[in-house]
Image (cartoon, rainbow, N blue to C red):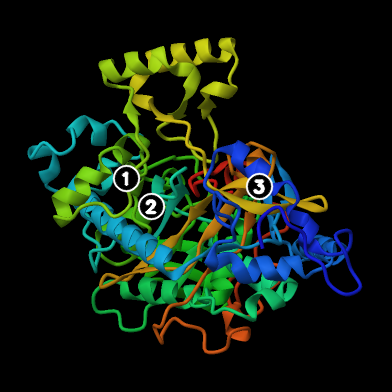
Amino acid sequence: MDVGSSASSAGGGVDELSGGLFDGYGEASAASGAWDEMFTADGSVREASAPVHAALASTAVRDLRGRADALATSYTDKGITFAVGGEERPFPLDVVPRVVSAQEWAVVEAGVAQRVRALEAFLADAYGPMRAVEDGVVPRGVITSSSHFHRVVAGIEPPNGVRVHVAGVDLIRDADGVFRVLEDNVRVPSGVSYVLTNRSAMAGAMPEAFSDQRIRPVAAYPRRLLAALRAAAPVGIEDPTVVVLTPGVYNSAYFEHALLARSMGIELVEGRDLVCRGGRLHMRTTAGLRPVHVVYRRVDDEYLDPVHFRSDSMLGCPGLLNAARAGNVTIANGIGNGVADDKLLYTYVPDLVRYYLDEEPVLPNVPTWRLEEREAREEVFDRLAELVVKPVDGSGGKGIVIGPAASPAQLEQLRARVSADPRGWIAQPVVRLSTVPTLVGDRVAPRHVDLRPFAVNDGSRVWVLPGGLTRVALPEGELVVNSSQGGGSKDTWVLADDRPDEAAPSRTRSAAAPTLPGAPPDRGPGVAGTADVRDQQQQQQQAAQTGEGQPC
């Protein structure tokens, strides 16, 4: 069925069936100038999306709207929220999924794994011999001037050579349908909890859309993550104790911390639950101190250890870094990984892939100007009104200036800020992110999306979760997808190929993740309880922490 046509059946016409959902979609999609992931330029439905389109076209509009409202209510009831400006809001989940074919995903999977391997090699080099600097691949100043480069961790060798245990690589699809890397997240990437909960919710909301296709499951993520964390344990530890370190309940991503701890069957702890003695890390429990060997931290570097970083931090544990340096505990992800997240370093990653791996990049970058370079800065200043300018250490869409949407006064302010700190900025062309049909009222409309695939590295293989967090910009024409800017999410369906270990044996049941816990737990069993009244400074630190990359 073409994009502009309407469905009909016995007992229902355009006003009753969702065929009318697509009225006017073709015109809106063409006007956006973006690659549409459900429809081709001539209005035909893409093969991978045909079952979803057919399911939508045979569902009553009122029923579809009801399902969407039920999703929002269930997310609120289960505490699946994200904090914006101190207010807890349900994370919007659109009822129309995003579908990625097996062939398309093969490219994404290979490209993300390649990128993680290159960044692993770079981090080992940056905190070691700096061969890439000596060989002229990347300037020393790019590394040492990064606000996330920490000399204090130089020389620390992870037990299994892994610093990037979890990565989130943000991708966009350009007007030609090519996947490109927008940025890397190898500090404390977040958002995978929404991948798991979205799949569980969509299995109940759109069961008929699962029935005619095989969708690769996402339920293996907690198991894969736990295996990677256990593999990172110090040498000689056969049955390591792994914990998730959270800033606390006031952190915007606390729901994710609690969900992952429970899904992996390990303890969720705060800094006050940990103590270092004799160069070893222990956890306070009702039965006394218990050794801890691996810390999956969801706390920024600066708050992890008040001995070496912020002395006023109440979120970490004094002596933690010394215990890691002694080889008695592994911190995942590694401290200092943020130098690989720096958007100036991002411009060198294709060269780093060639240098460390002797391969051509599978996934290209978005073309980028380095504003610390005079000629590039002059060119950008001449075209400021048509480009996107970003701070190199920004996250969550903060600080980004989209030239075509900025006022002359805003552009002049930007010019002054860049001139004062050129190393702190990059510029990119405005990329028309691809669009996916999104329910808006009683119709669907094209809305721009990006994709954050998650990768887990156990030291022997980089496993890429088949799917990822699709973020959607809900306001019309908006290109910033973060929830802090009014964005939401979609379930990402990767169609299975013939691999027996990944393809779902049942087309419906196993495509969805098992039912996940609703409200996050207060604490894991056996950990000493937290006082009801928390110190105000700790609350502020919990809420202020931003190193999770603001995925939403």
Q: Most extreme residue toward the bottom, as rendered?
A: 505
Any part of residue 324 in sight: yes
**Which x, y percent locates residue 300?**
46, 48
The residue labelled by disc 1 is 340
Evaluate if marks 1 and 2 touch, with contact meaning CB atoms under 8 Å apart: yes
First in residue order: circle 2 vs circle 3: 3
**Which x, y percent locates residue 148?**
35, 39
**Which x, y percent locates residue 292?**
41, 71
Query: Please, is residue 224 above or below residue 506 in the view?
Result: above
What's the residue at 47%, 82% (across, down)? 503
Evaluate if marks 1 and 3 touch, with contact meaning CB atoms under 8 Å apart: no
For disc 1, the neighbor class at 10 Å (few under 14, some 14 to 19, many from 20) is many
**Which x, y percent locates residue 486?**
68, 41
Q: Nearer the viewer, residue 267 or 45?
A: 45
The residue labelled by disc 2 is 186
Any part of residue 241 in sight: no
Q: CA distance from mark 1 to mark 2?
A: 7 Å
Q: Is residue 321 left or right of residue 83?
A: left
For disc 3, the neighbor class at 10 Å (few under 14, some 14 to 19, many from 20) is many
The residue labelled by disc 3 is 26
What's the residue at 51%, 69% (across, down)? 284
